[in-house]
Image (spheres, helix red, strand yellow):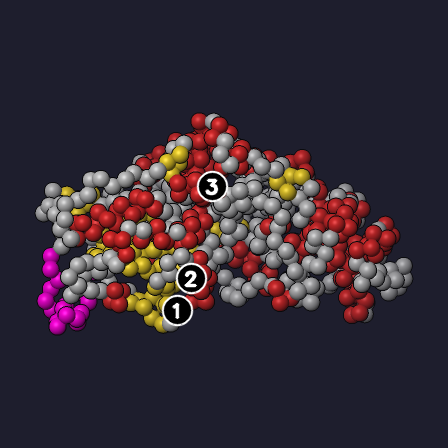
């Protein structure tokens, strides 16, 4: 007879998704293994591999990274040196154990949940000494390739830490369904190093049952038929409900030590005025509020925003910007106050200058500025010989000033940005229907919305859209169309990382109130290929009002966005995008694309101060 290799239920549904979506990438078929009976499939280990009770050699060729294949003796870099699969090979053991190779990342919401609930795998006493865990870390919190230094942060999340190593190439994407969401579990027989089964983002109850069945087969015992089914509430498993509980309405943002005025009320009051003041623009027509309109989810409703000219990207909502680790689509700012400074001197946005803004503050906000920034008195800006009416670095008017006067003006300019950031930190999102549903009101969502929620969880959306922000703040390549006015593909984080390194106002430099609190910028000088065409995950709160969608603003409706994700982005030969879609972005068919939308419409995020 033939034994069915266990795969997640929705992976089977994806087998028809390619034709439904017009994709040439078909989901892999369910694999089977020819066996003699359900009583077991294992032959004794070859004598040459076991001498005097010790392993003397790794299983010989053929090796294959695939279902039922015997794995090659792969090597990974661990916390204390090289770690090889041969370290787990036990040909002399009286009973097989299961090596559970779990591929994970630090940005992934479902991965974080599994890491924190690893003990669920061992809750049966029969499993305690029959399972060995190996966690392979592919990427860090920002989706940069994992380094050994990140393993300590992974270990801190694990409730049952065992062996840890890094695997930036994602070696086990080659096993089975490589387009399924993370984490990926590859289950290996330690006596033969044969892959027994795989699972992706599994329900812990199902995974636990799968492990018990595999051990029964290896022990040549009858297969268990009394395994409990996963518990559900309103059609969702306990695991899925727990993921949703972590998406509770966000409260106050974390403290920002780089801005000592971040949570001072008078600073926020000044910042609110500056946010909407068109007089800070020499044209007298543009302010921060031009592109971040409170009536439009603090966006502007345009495909590409228009300041004094049309820019190359869509204006993201500032709902929860104060919670974000990086700012702008490409992360070229590392604090909220640094982001606030960017548009002021951008030639297409507000097209102002720090001298012009300093003069406006001195002329119109001197009292309020002094009340907030008492230790930084305004310089004598009325002296136009020393302080020209307008100018910024590289302008002749700026270059003619002394270094001390340049610093005095820049300090006023930076403080304006810190005041605007203080205002944005006062914004809070109102609870929506999802929040009420998670709180126990099962009637808060109707039937189509609940179906969309199930698709959201099953297809892997919660990998990136998780937690109170419903965002991982990491950078992902999913081949969205460009919004650039010249039609060129947008390089995203690959360029944003370099811009951040050379920026004047990063959190680690002199204008920060706590340079030591700056985020690490290591590795940004050489962005990896995975960052080409990658963009920051937007929050899903305030989603219905924040369209058009995508960094280029090229999708007018949520249906178009859902279709784009379901088809794994633009094709590789489409010049409107650049980079390679990530392997954990699954295909899902036209029906799922359609049925997801009613849930997305629930994700409102009206703001209040």
Query: Measuring 55% from the left and 45% from the top, which residue is drawn there?
Result: 469
The quarter in which the C terminus is drawn is: top right
Q: Quadrant of residue 354?
A: bottom right
Per the image, the residue denoted by label 2 is 155
Question: Which residue ends up furthest to the front in the rendered image?
Answer: 125
Residue 567 in the image: state x and y as whole percent.
Answer: 41, 40
Query: Measuring 17% from the left and 53% from the top, which residue is drawn there?
Result: 218
Question: Which comes sooner in the sequence, label 3 or label 1?
Answer: 1
Are circles 1 and 2 on residues that touch, CB within 8 Å? yes
Residue 67 in the image: state x and y as whole percent.
Answer: 23, 51
Foreground of the two, 20 or 1:
1
Distance from disc 1 to disc 2, alpha carbons, whole Å, reads: 10 Å
Per the image, the residue denoted by label 1 is 79
Decide if residue 276 is on the left or right side of residue 96.
right
Q: Is residue 94 visible?
A: yes
Q: Which mark, residue 244?
A: 3
Are circles 3 and 1 on residues that touch, CB within 8 Å? no
Distance from disc 2 to disc 3, alpha carbons, whole Å, reads: 24 Å
Residue 398 in the image: state x and y as whole percent.
Answer: 78, 63
Decide if residue 35 is on the left or right side of residue 63.
left
Are circles 2 and 3 on residues that touch, CB within 8 Å? no
Foreground of the two, 261 or 93:
93
Q: Which residues are magenta?
A: 43-64
């Amino acid at each position: 007879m033939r034994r069915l290799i266990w795969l997640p239920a929705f992976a089977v549904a994806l087998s028809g998704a390619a034709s439904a979506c017009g994709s040439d990438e078909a989901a892999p078929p369910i694999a089977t293994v020819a066996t003699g009976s359900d009583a077991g499939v294992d032959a004794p280990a070859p004598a040459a591999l076991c001498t005097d009770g010790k392993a003397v050699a790794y299983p010989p060729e053929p090796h294959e990274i695939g279902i039922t294949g015997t794995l090659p003796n792969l090597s990974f870099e661990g916390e204390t040196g090289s770690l090889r699969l041969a370290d787990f090979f036990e040909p002399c053991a009286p009973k097989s154990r299961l090596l559970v190779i779990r591929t994970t990342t630090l940005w992934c919401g479902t991965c974080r949940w599994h890491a924190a609930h690893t003990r669920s795998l061992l809750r049966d006493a029969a499993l305690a000494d029959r399972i060995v865990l190996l966690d392979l870390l592919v990427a860090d919190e920002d989706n940069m390739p994992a380094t050994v230094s990140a393993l300590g942060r992974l270990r801190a999340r694990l409730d049952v830490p065992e062996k840890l190593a890094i695997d930036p190439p994602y070696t086990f994407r080659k096993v089975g369904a490589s387009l399924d969401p993370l984490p990926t579990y590859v289950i290996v027989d330690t006596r033969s190093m044969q892959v027994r089964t795989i699972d992706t983002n599994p329900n812990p109850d199902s995974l636990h049952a799968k492990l018990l069945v595999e051990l029964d087969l290896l022990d040549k015992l009858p297969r268990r038929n009394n395994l409990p089914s996963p518990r559900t509430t309103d059609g969702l498993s306990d695991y899925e409900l727990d993921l949703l509980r972590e998406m509770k309405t966000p409260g106050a943002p974390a403290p920002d030590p780089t801005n000592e005025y971040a949570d001072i009320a008078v600073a926020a009051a000044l910042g609110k005025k500056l946010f909407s003041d068109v007089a800070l623009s020499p044209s007298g027509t543009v302010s921060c509020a031009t592109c971040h309109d409170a009536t439009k989810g603090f966006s502007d409703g345009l495909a590409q925003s228009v300041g004094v000219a049309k820019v190359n990207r869509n204006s993201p909502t500032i709902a929860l910007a104060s919670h974000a680790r990086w700012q702008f689509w490409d992360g070229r700012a590392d604090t909220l106050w640094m982001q606030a400074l960017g548009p002021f001197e951008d030639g297409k946005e507000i097209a102002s200058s720090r001298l012009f803004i300093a003069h406006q503050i001195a002329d119109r906000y001197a009292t309020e500025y002094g009340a907030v920034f008492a230790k930084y008195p305004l310089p004598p800006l009325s002296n136009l010989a020393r302080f020209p009416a307008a100018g910024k670095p590289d302008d002749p008017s700026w270059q003619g000033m002394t270094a001390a006067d340049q610093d005095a003006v820049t300090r006023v300019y930076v403080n304006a940005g810190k005041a605007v950031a203080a205002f944005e930190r006062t914004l809070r999102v109102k609870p929506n229907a999802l929040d009420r549903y998670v709180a126990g009101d099962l009637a808060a969502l109707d039937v189509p919305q609940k179906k969309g929620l199930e698709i959201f969880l099953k297809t892997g959306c919660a990998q990136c859209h998780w937690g109170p922000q419903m965002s991982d703040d990491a950078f992902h390549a999913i081949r969205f169309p460009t919004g650039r006015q010249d039609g060129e593909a947008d390089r995203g984080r690959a360029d944003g990382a370099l811009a951040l390194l050379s920026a004047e106002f990063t959190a680690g430099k002199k204008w920060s109130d706590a340079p030591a609190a700056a985020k690490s910028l290591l590795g940004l000088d050489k962005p990896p290929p995975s960052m080409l065409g990658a963009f920051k995950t937007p929050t899903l709160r305030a989603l219905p009002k924040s369209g058009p969608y995508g960094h280029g603003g090229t999708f007018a409706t949520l249906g178009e966005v859902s279709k784009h994700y379901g088809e794994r982005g633009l094709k590789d030969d489409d010049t409107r995008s650049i980079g390679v879609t990530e392997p954990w972005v699954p295909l899902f068919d036209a029906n799922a694309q359609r049925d997801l939308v009613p849930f997305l419409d629930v994700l409102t995020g009206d703001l209040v101060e």
